[in-house]
Image: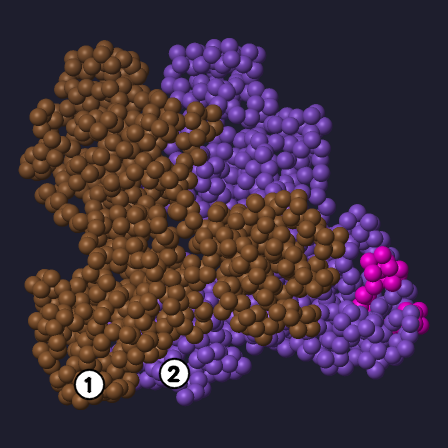
Chain colours: A purple, B brown
Amino acid sequence: MSLGANMTVAEVLARAIQQRVRLLAEDEGKALLAQFGIAAPAGRRVADVAEAKRAAEELGYPLVVKALVPGLAHKTDQGAVKLGIENEAGLLSTVRELDRLFPGMPLLVERMAGPGVEMIVGLTDDAQFGPCLMIGTGGILTEVFEDVEFLLLPATRADLLRSLTRLKGYRLLAGFRGTAAVDVDRLLDALEGVARLGLEAAGYYEAVDINPLRVNDMGATALDVKVMLKSEVTRNPGVASSAGVAHFAGFFAPGSVAIIGASATPGKPGHTVIENILANGYAGKVYLVNPKGGEILGLPVYSATSDLPEGIDLAVIIVAAKDTPKALRQAAARGIRHVVLSAGGFAETDETGAQIQQELIDVIREYGMHVLGPNTSGHVSTPARFTSTFFPLGKIRRGNVAYVAQTGNFATFTMKYILTAECFGVSRVVGLGNKIDIEESQALEYLGNDPETSAIVMYVENIKYPRRFVDVARRVTRKKPVVMLKGGSTEAGKKAAAAHTAAMASEDRLIEGMLRQAGVVRISDYSHLVLAGKALSMCPLPAGNRVAFLAPSGAMLVCLSDLSTRLGLRVPELEEETLRRIQEITPAFIRIRNPVDIWAAALSVGIEAAYGVGVEAVLDDPNVDAAIAVFMLTKEMGIPDSYDFVVDLVRRHPDKPLLVSFTGDKKCMDECRESLEPRGVPTFMQIEEPFQALSILSLCADVARRP
Amino acid sequence: MSLGANMTVAEVLARAIQQRVRLLAEDEGKALLAQFGIAAPAGRRVADVAEAKRAAEELGYPLVVKALVPGLAHKTDQGAVKLGIENEAGLLSTVRELDRLFPGMPLLVERMAGPGVEMIVGLTDDAQFGPCLMIGTGGILTEVFEDVEFLLLPATRADLLRSLTRLKGYRLLAGFRGTAAVDVDRLLDALEGVARLGLEAAGYYEAVDINPLRVNDMGATALDVKVMLKSEVTRNPGVASSAGVAHFAGFFAPGSVAIIGASATPGKPGHTVIENILANGYAGKVYLVNPKGGEILGLPVYSATSDLPEGIDLAVIIVAAKDTPKALRQAAARGIRHVVLSAGGFAETDETGAQIQQELIDVIREYGMHVLGPNTSGHVSTPARFTSTFFPLGKIRRGNVAYVAQTGNFATFTMKYILTAECFGVSRVVGLGNKIDIEESQALEYLGNDPETSAIVMYVENIKYPRRFVDVARRVTRKKPVVMLKGGSTEAGKKAAAAHTAAMASEDRLIEGMLRQAGVVRISDYSHLVLAGKALSMCPLPAGNRVAFLAPSGAMLVCLSDLSTRLGLRVPELEEETLRRIQEITPAFIRIRNPVDIWAAALSVGIEAAYGVGVEAVLDDPNVDAAIAVFMLTKEMGIPDSYDFVVDLVRRHPDKPLLVSFTGDKKCMDECRESLEPRGVPTFMQIEEPFQALSILSLCADVARRP
């Protein structure tokens, strides 16, 4: 391969692929890198001793000589790389040795590079994620400590720097054991170059490993590069980074709805969905369809979809999987363009189901419909007092958090839990189901602009269009928090690849990288779907990660300080004035600091006075972004007459989250919770939970502050 | 320094310290290592070119030459180390260069070692922990990734191997990128040698760094060693590894008790303690002492301790700190030998308090007393129906778990929480307070032999005698589980030391190492003190870490599988027969595997039948050590008529833990909990909690299986 003057990178790589080249020769790879501004040591390809001597004269010692053996992956292990050649005698013996080991192979004579930190930088063109960049610390660190970060391309310089600083090995770049700090700006230049290569050559390469990229105070130099080409060019189809989402109004504010498959039998999904719609006080028109006709829950029943009037906004189709394509087509014929497909039994089940699902896709394309599901437990829009869920939820509490969930469990059991155990409500819920049409990026884009929604919590098992998702989420997270639980960080996809980058590119690492790029805060426990929704519903975003907290036990203070550190929260020093205010109500043998040991004050001036003064003082402190109070509650030691003072504190400090937990008598704890929660103060039964909740808020606030 | 034939290692080091040597010359350090069987490259100390040439003839090339500069810590950085000398010309130029850089200094000429994996092995003689061994992966891995493990000495070969295999860098030892696997047995021999050195030379060295220890298939070779001596010999006083603990009976089964500082005023500690004793139904004699005399709660009050009869087993002294020494002395004068000192205001408060505390220690020594506290919220012994706590707890539930806690919060608010929110009980509770006499090792030793106690949960902020603790805990953990929350993993103690080993020896790393050695399972959340107690009370130890679980949602199954992996639990494949039994009640579109997706079966055959069959099938499976069931509970979708079937399943599978959680309607969840918990089935409000609980059980079972 040689880079013709008039050929683009893509043309050159395409020709190589045509010629069945799978691994570019090292000097060809370096020439490719040079096109993108990535330096390599000065070098010459030579064929014999005479050429080697001439190259040495031009380059100067010390030198490195490598045999250019086509397709040889582990050059060093195979003895094809000779370092530290100091003079002509050494050069001649090296050339002879390589010629004996690899007869007839051309050699690469290179100037030996100066010392520096070794990194690995790579590219992989993932079938699902498209071109991705990997940055890692080099050498055995990559393989043993897996100290690597991934980014989807394109990536901003800020993305690159964020990934770089997240590496444990970043410490090495700042100067270590007598070595000078590396030039991070020039390293970023090189990374940007690799990223450009990754985009321009997408579809042509399987993987690129620059390993090592040696970095020092002079810049970054690619000492070796492997460019592995695909066996045929496969450009991943582009996906629009934005989908028109105006049609969501048809789901979230339908003027009329048809229930196709309405049932007269209580307990059947086609019955429960009507009960839910009525229980929520939906003001639009509800049309029921069932071949039997008659009346259900006081509403007349049409015996066929074809009998329905024109112009219905939304249909909820609850019929057996095999009957769904026909029902969908009939709805389309009546001009219905928004449909919820509730039944399961499609691609998630078996081959027959997958075929039916394909039929559905054909109908959608034919009529230009917008479809949620199939295999979805439905959706909720509290501002429209509407839901399509067939699970007996009854009246759904209105709130300002939206949920997008690729699990039937959410709009059913988890929603029931939120309604019965928590006090916060939702704006919208979208059950994605099998996502044959509407997927998470579209839902996110709509909710990003939805004035009813101030925060979005998502559960997804896969991301259908990762590149679109990053683009959409980047925009949305500038405006409102987005939290995601990604189910199934399976390692099954781990490949035993020749390239480090491909071997390291597990789905979980790519997801991790893309969510960070996109500003989406990742959580890992299912129950934190509720925790996050609650925190985002009930609290403002804090201005920073500095928390003050009060507890009635040194042991709790110590353990919760450790927990704060693990969760990325800081426990700052308090102002003199703050300390004075709390010390005033505290016996002298307790020296007040943050966190605040409040038990002695509580015993001395009473729970209400102690916590009232203590919480107010820390909320007033300019060093504090949020406060957590752990109340000590037992009848015998006294409980507050009322918790009004806490509600009042929250009202008077609207910009700082105040979260509450407790210890002591379970009954008193329940009473406190029942008093505070309905009035908007979040309480948590386990003392660690408010810290986990605040950590999520703090990470969301970090994203909101990104330039 | 030279090792005289008739001198012990200690004598040689003592002489060096006397001569104000702080850092042994490298060849002296290697000679010291040789005494303990740790190899170094063959080498000679030489003074000039002629000697160097002679050494080279004896040793053979390639060689390494180092300048032996007294006190030079960073030899390589200073240019005092020259590697890879291939011939006499190289040797001569090297000797001349070193002589120019370090005029007059002797040189060490050594045979250059073969390639291998670089480790770091070190010793530090910690003021609190005594001699400790560090094992780590070498090079920058040590400093950037902090891949090190610590052990208290002495350590068994099993301890050494366990630490070695915990290193991330252990992968390097198994053969990596074409290198041969190292000889782990010979590495362990070398580590045992270092451990012996660490013990024999304890008191003399500040730290020892063998860095690198090069390890390959031929064994382990110390390429460099720094032996840093103390400025004066400070042998840490030996502490008996076992304290006589027969006297604990005086606390846990007292025949009679005196309350010194009894109060007639309800709400005062001196009153509440009497209420607690009466509420628990203590059968022994209770004597009250208060200068005012009279009667309290129907019991006569003595006006002075001197009026008490002889032979009282235990005194609880609840008087102001300043009056405590006098009260203690008076109790001693009446022959009382067991005392609980409840008041605070001692060393934890201020200098005056510390002085009073010292007075107490003097009295204890003088009379040979056994004292709990001061600054303790007391102790509990349910078999004796006795407690000395002054917090209004009332009747304390009897159980088989003992708590040892260095926090006043435990025997007060946390105990109140356990009594009101949980169903399990305790055998003993020991509030350690300021530990002027009884400390955690003694308590642990007693409880280890206590037939009333089957598991021990501890919270400590510091370990008074680490070496004793390891010895005791090693014995106890062979018999019953011990779980510990260590408060305050402060990094304040981090030293900026010249030696790597000393720099890495944070208190938290030493604690981590010693707890693992001792077989104590470490937890990190305060609320897990309750979680662990509950699990150990209500469940058998599982035979292994293999869990099967059932939940009504694919999303939960996915997230909980991830959680299991993070917690060290395995989710094994199930037997064909197990799958068949569950598939039989499950619609065909769900393919049963572990974890079990149970919702479709529950909708099809009902909750009770589905969970009954499912749980029984997995508990019967020989691949399963424990099961977790997440029930789906809403009135509308149906709940079991009774939970008897769960109680029955537990009874019929006594060797396998079954833990329960739920999702759905909070009220149904509460009802399920209220039905199951009193009958010995542990339930958890958050679905992650049973996994955390099982993880603790599984780690305890691991320890129990240690050979």
Viewer can see residue A157: no
Q: Where is residue B703 in the image (x, y as percent from the top left)?
A: 39, 47
Q: In this view, does B231 lie to the left or right of B470?
A: left
State which region is magenta: A303-329
Q: Where is residue A504 in the image (x, y as percent from the top left)?
A: 54, 40
Q: What residue type is labelled 2?
A: Lys
Chain assignment, label 1: B
Q: Which of B515 and A91 is in front in this view?
A: B515
**Label 1 secondary element:** strand
From the image, tell me which residue sits under label 1. Answer: B300
Q: What residue type is labelled 1?
A: Pro
Above/below status of A375 relative to B321: above
Task: Please tell me in which quadrant of the rendered image residue A369 appears.
Answer: bottom right
Residue B586 falls inside the magenta stretch: no
Count the labels in the image. Answer: 2
Task: Please tell me in which quadrant of the rendered image residue A521 appears.
Answer: bottom right
Q: Are marks 1 and 2 in contact (CB under 8 Å)?
A: no
> Which residue, as the protein is rendered here, is positioned at the far right?
A307
Q: How crowded is mark 2: few (under 14 residues within 10 Å), some or many (20 or more)?
A: few
